[in-house]
């Protein structure tokens, strides 16, 4: 739907009811009944004529109209004036009806104008039983979708000025965009394309480091599309901070319904800012809902999917779901040198008329870097703005003492560094080193023009619960992505419920779907033996055969890791020769010993800003020594549960011991032996042997 705001000058002849009322009541009176009559004349048949027009303000010699169109054709000022004149001029005896201005507006603006007409009682509520309803109810257009808690929405209107291919290319260069953007510009301006709207041949994925860069890229892209008649509307609707409950919002569906002819930008990172390690079950219903909406409206609505590099969210899930149904081209932000970065920074500053910066301030803000991403410049610009607001605009705060709080550094460590700092796991660390070394050698062979054999990297992780199998798999995905071995750092976790269908023939499609989700990353199949455990025959064979086939199909782009208990995994792998032959690495995660568990406890405590006293360490070593003798004691999970109970016990101890007294930072940071006298520790206390009878 397209929305326009129009202002028209008019005069009326002596036959007009408006002229009579003006004469009787004076120009200060603009009765609602006469405007209702005029709006009735404007009404028409919205379904057949695809147009709705309403007067929302009437002034001497001027009237203001909001126009809603569901036709796939943009309207210019003269066309809008002619439409209004055809409906209103003759019926209401208006003369000299001239459009002073007409512009496309957002859905939010149109909704406000409709509300203004309603509150002024300019919309009739009478009903003609012979001819049906007269006028419109502004609520019928379902435009009030801006107040909700499950997603956020912003709208933009593109500039009306013309933009040539050269000008667009210059702007893209100034924004330091990737070559993929310039390639798409050439396609958009290609003389082979018609200059008329027939639908959208492709949609877009924008990859950037932050939302500001992505929005500017989308605006430039859509500006060129509108210039070449590939878009009917200048309106862009951005959906972001999408929660998992958005599928229950009827307002979200209304946005798709009302956006024909315009553009919808969907940011895919999710509201809870999930990390790049996303479970296959996250946002599953959101993916299904959005995929359904995109499929239904993709012909007349342009979709731009935005993936923020560090927070891809449900990007892989949604795009893999859609790739067989719509055509998507990816455009990326690029890089620039220091001169380009300075030019781009100055361009952003020009948008803030009241802000001024010296050349020295700008150079200092860029630091010592020589290469910049567009997103880097946006971050620098925001930092400059904050400093100028405090130091220049409000100089009284320049010397103010700012609050500084000591806090634990939550910055995410490098994945390889994190793995190397983990307790134990020497075989795993050696495996990662082998894979990385192999990749480096393959790259050198490729650079020299030699054959570059692609080695299979499928793996089996065996070990008891809590032995860090899943944690290592997540780190491995990020490490291999950072080294360029994998395209994505995504890890897709799945189990039997995600793979095995309820009926015969359902399993293979489920398996293919999970491989699409994991493409470019790692598919982690936990408790893999559950696929066939006590289920030999049709369903188990179908599951294994489908997995083996997809492992071969995705040999070059996806790694599969099977995980579970050692004994059961051995039986599972031996069930199928094809599966066994495709496994390159077998990695055993042994149970931790007491000393290693103690090291894990100290690392976990450090992450929480806590320290463990000497007596507490001795007590914990005793607890771990006893726990290690028990079957399935939980390894790292046991340590985590022990620490959580100890911190709760510490809180109770401190409140009891220091009641009414000042508590220092040291007291809040130390865990004592008393704090580890908790339930989970008592479960693993060595029990005294009981003897019957007399002891000699």
Image: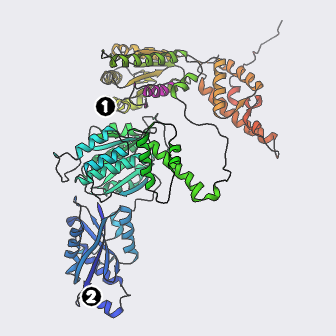
Looking at the rendered structure, the secondary structure element under dot 1 is: helix
Q: Earlier in the sequence, mark 2 or mark 1?
A: 2
For residue 28, the mark is none
Using a 10 Å C-alpha cutoff, classify the residue at mark 2 as few (fewer than 14 neighbours), some (14 to 19) or many (20 or more): some
Q: Quadrant of residue 578?
A: top left
Q: Residue at x 51, y 28 (%)?
A: 415
Asked if residue 263 can be seen in this view, the reply is yes
* Relative vertical location of residue 130 with respect to residue 79 in this rendering, above or below: below
Q: Residue at x 24, y 76 (%)?
A: 98
Relative to 416, 8 lies left or right: left
Q: Residue 549 or 444: which is nearer the viewer? A: 444
Q: Is residue 482 magenta?
A: yes
Q: Residue 444 or 152: which is nearer the viewer? A: 444
* Relative vertical location of residue 292 with respect to residue 624 in this rendering, above or below: below
Asked if residue 502 can be seen in this view, the reply is no
Q: Please state the extent of the stretch shown in magenta in the rendering.
A: 472-494
Image location of residue 695, percent across then percent down: 82, 8
Image location of residue 307, percent across then percent down: 40, 41
Mark 1, residue position: 509
Question: How far apart are the alpha carbons under marks 2 and 1?
Answer: 69 Å
The C terminus: image quadrant: top right
Image location of residue 318, percent across then percent down: 36, 40
For residue 17, the mark is 2
């Amino acid at each position: 739907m397209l929305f326009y705001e129009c202002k028209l000058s008019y005069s009326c002849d002596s036959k007009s009811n408006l002229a009579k009322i003006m004469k009787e009541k004076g120009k200060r009176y603009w009765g609602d009944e006469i405007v209702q009559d005029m709006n009735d004349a404007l009404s028409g048949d919205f379904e057949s004529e695809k147009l709705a027009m309403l007067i929302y303000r009437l002034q001497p010699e001027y009237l203001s109209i909001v126009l809603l169109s569901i036709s796939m054709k943009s309207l210019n000022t003269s066309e809008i004036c002619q439409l209004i004149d055809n409906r209103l001029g003759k019926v209401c005896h208006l003369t000299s009806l001239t459009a002073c201005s007409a512009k496309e507006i957002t859905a939010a603006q149109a909704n406000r104008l409709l509300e203004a007409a309603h509150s002024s009682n300019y919309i009739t509520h009478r009903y003609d039983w012979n001819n049906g309803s007269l006028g419109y109810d502004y609520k019928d257009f379902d435009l009030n979708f801006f107040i909700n808690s499950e997603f956020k929405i912003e709208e933009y209107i593109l500039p009306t000025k013309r933009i040539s291919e050269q000008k667009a290319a210059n702007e893209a260069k100034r924004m330091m965009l990737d070559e993929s953007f310039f390639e798409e510009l050439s396609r958009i301006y290609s003389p082979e394309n018609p200059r008329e709207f027939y639908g959208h041949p492709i949609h877009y994925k924008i990859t950037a480091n932050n939302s500001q860069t992505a929005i500017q890229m989308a605006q430039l892209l859509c500006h060129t599309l509108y210039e070449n008649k590939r878009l009917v509307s200048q309106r862009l609707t951005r959906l972001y901070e999408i929660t998992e409950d958005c599928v229950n919002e009827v307002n979200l569906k209304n946005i798709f319904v009302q956006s024909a002819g315009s553009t919808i930008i969907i940011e895919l990172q999710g509201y809870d800012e999930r990390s790049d390690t996303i479970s296959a079950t996250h946002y599953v219903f959101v993916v299904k809902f959005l995929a359904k909406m995109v499929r239904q409206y993709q012909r007349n609505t342009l979709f731009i999917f935005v993936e923020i590099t560090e927070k891809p969210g449900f990007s892989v899930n949604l795009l893999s779901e859609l790739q067989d149904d719509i055509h998507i081209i990816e455009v990326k932000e690029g890089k620039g040198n220091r001169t380009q970065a300075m030019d781009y920074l100055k361009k952003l500053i020009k948008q803030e008329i009241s802000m001024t910066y010296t050349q020295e301030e700008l150079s200092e803000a860029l630091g010592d870097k020589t290469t910049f991403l567009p997103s880097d410049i946006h971050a620098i610009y925001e930092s400059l703005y904050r400093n100028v607001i405090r130091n220049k605009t409000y100089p009284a705060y320049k010397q103010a003492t700012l609050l500084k709080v000591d806090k634990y550094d939550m910055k995410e460590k490098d994945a390889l560094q994190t793995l190397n700092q983990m307790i134990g796991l020497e075989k795993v660390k050696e495996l990662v080193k082998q894979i990385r070394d192999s990749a480096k050698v393959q790259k050198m062979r490729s650079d020299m023009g030699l054959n570059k054999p692609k080695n299979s990297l499928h793996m089996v992780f065996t070990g008891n619960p809590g032995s860090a199998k899943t944690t290592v798999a997540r780190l491995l995905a990020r490490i291999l992505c950072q080294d360029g071995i994998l395209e994505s750092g995504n890890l897709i976790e799945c189990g039997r419920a995600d793979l095995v269908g309820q009926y015969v023939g359902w399993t293979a499609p489920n398996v293919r779907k999970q491989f699409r989700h994991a493409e470019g990353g790692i598919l982690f199949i936990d408790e893999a033996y559950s696929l066939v455990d006590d289920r030999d025959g049709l369903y188990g064979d179908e599951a294994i055969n489908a997995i083996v086939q997809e492992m071969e199909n995705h040999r070059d782009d996806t790694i599969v890791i099977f995980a579970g208990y050692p004994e059961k995994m051995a039986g599972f792998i031996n069930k199928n020769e094809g599966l066994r032959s495709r496994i390159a690495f077998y990695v055993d995660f042994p149970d931790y010993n007491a000393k290693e568990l103690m090291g894990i406890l100290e690392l976990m405590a450090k992450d929480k800003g806590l320290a463990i006293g000497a007596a507490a360490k001795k007590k914990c070593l005793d607890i771990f020594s006893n726990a290690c003798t028990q079957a399935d004691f939980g390894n790292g999970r046991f340590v985590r549960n022990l620490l959580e109970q100890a911190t709760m016990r510490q809180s109770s101890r401190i409140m009891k011991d220091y009641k009414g007294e000042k508590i220092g930072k040291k007291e809040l940071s130390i865990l004592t032996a008393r704090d580890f006298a908790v339930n989970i520790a008592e479960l693993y206390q060595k029990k005294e042997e009981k003897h019957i009878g007399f002891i000699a």
